[in-house]
Image (cartoon, rainbow, N blue to C red):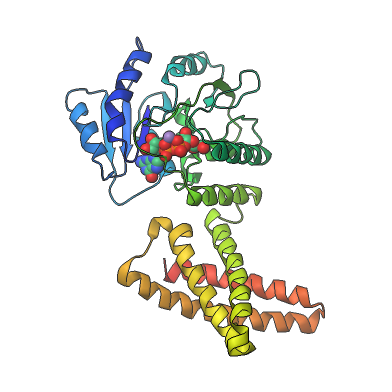
Amino acid sequence: MIIPTFKEAPNVAPLLAKLEAALQGVVWQAIFVDDNSPDGTAAVVKAIAATDPRVICLHRIGRRGLAGAVIEGAMASAAPFVAVIDGDMQHDETVLPRMLKALQADRADLAVGSRYTEEAEGRVAGLSARRESGSRFATWLGQRVLRLDLSDPMSGFFMIRRELVEKAAPRLATDGFKVLFDLASVLDPPPRVVEFAYEFRSREHGESKLDGRVVAHYLSLLGSKLSRDVLSPRALLFGLVGLSGVAVNVAVAYAVRGMTGPDTAQLIGAVVAMTSNYLINNAVTYRDKRKRGFGLLAGYLRFGLLCSIGFAANVAVASLVFQVIPEPWVGVVAGAGVGAAWNYVTTSLAVW
Ligand code: GDD
Ligand code: MN
């Protein structure tokens, strides 16, 4: 079992007790993958591991990310079947023996714990109404992109043959929450899937780490799959942030225009947009390489310089194209495309 944890100290012992009870008669191992949680989760796991050889702690330093934690844990296992289960007891561990049976009997390659299946609607006690509708929408989108018919492609609860994880590993994204989705879409031929409905429990200790950034990452992963991996999730996020910058630019220029005159207003709008692009990219697109303190300032100067060149390229390409195709939007789109590509490539090399 792979159990990714971030700030789950009070959940470790009760979860192990539940696993122990559910897995009577099964040979198992629990690999906790903890990203150096500030609440000392790793120490709690190691204290138990000191006397129970079935328990292991992969204690990662300087890294964050659910998907990467899950992949690393699975790669550290030598078991024929690996299960992934959250460390907060929201998943129903009593389903694990049935998942194992299905894989052992070779009825499937992948067993998924589903909160939504048609025949037996999984219940989602642990989700707020807003989160539940968001989750259903994300599921619906995921199903459009995946060739597989998974009723809960966002599930963090599943069991798979280890060799399939090893096969897929080089192509998996290590950031974000959507490791099952990514696994299922990377594997070729697609795995045979069996689903088990379960009731998603409420959390008793700690809080969810799924936030707006996670959602943005998920949408970018979907977009990347839709482009058949031509565009990386990061490039797509960068592009989305760039679009938000266009909106900021226009809004700010419009707001200050009366006070400064159109040219200065346009300049102020551009500088504000560039700043917000930089900060959002730093916080979301490059979350894993986030800059702080002096590095944040140095990065900002480099970002500003590179994007100014990108902007000049944008204008130059737009006017060149306009001479060939006298349709304004063609030039604008071509210029923006070239500028954005320049900004993405150069800032990914020189800033982050
Ligand atoms: N190592 C590590 N690193 N573990 C993490 C990280 C991280 O950066 N972020 C979260 N985790 C762990 C948590 O400690 C928990 O054990 C598990 O991953 C799930 O995180 P939660 O924060 O509890 O997620 P959730 O309950 O809101 O989300 C559930 O639904 C998602 C789909 O909507 C989970 O089942 C997810 O797995 C699922 O993708
Ligand atoms: Mn949870």
Query: Relative to 301, does residue 14 appear above or below in the rendering?
Result: above
Furthest toward the front, the residue is: 259
Furthest toward the top, the residue is: 25
Residue at image location 61% in from the left, 32% down from the top: 190
Query: Relative to 27, does residue 136 appear above or below in the rendering?
Result: below
Lateral position of residue 18 relative to residue 283, left or right: left
Residue nearer the viewer, 262 or 288: 262
Q: Is residue 76 visible?
A: yes
Query: Relative to 327, does residue 229 appear above or below in the rendering?
Result: above
Residue nearer the viewer, 19 or 128: 128
Determine the image quadrant of residue 133.
top right
Which corner quadrant of the figure contains ligand 2? Answer: top left
In the rendering, at what x and y percent does residue 213 appear? 49, 52
Residue at image location 53% in from the left, 81% down from the top: 308
Residue at image location 52% in from the left, 16% down from the top: 102
Furthest toward the right, the residue is: 326
Q: Is residue 69 visible?
A: no
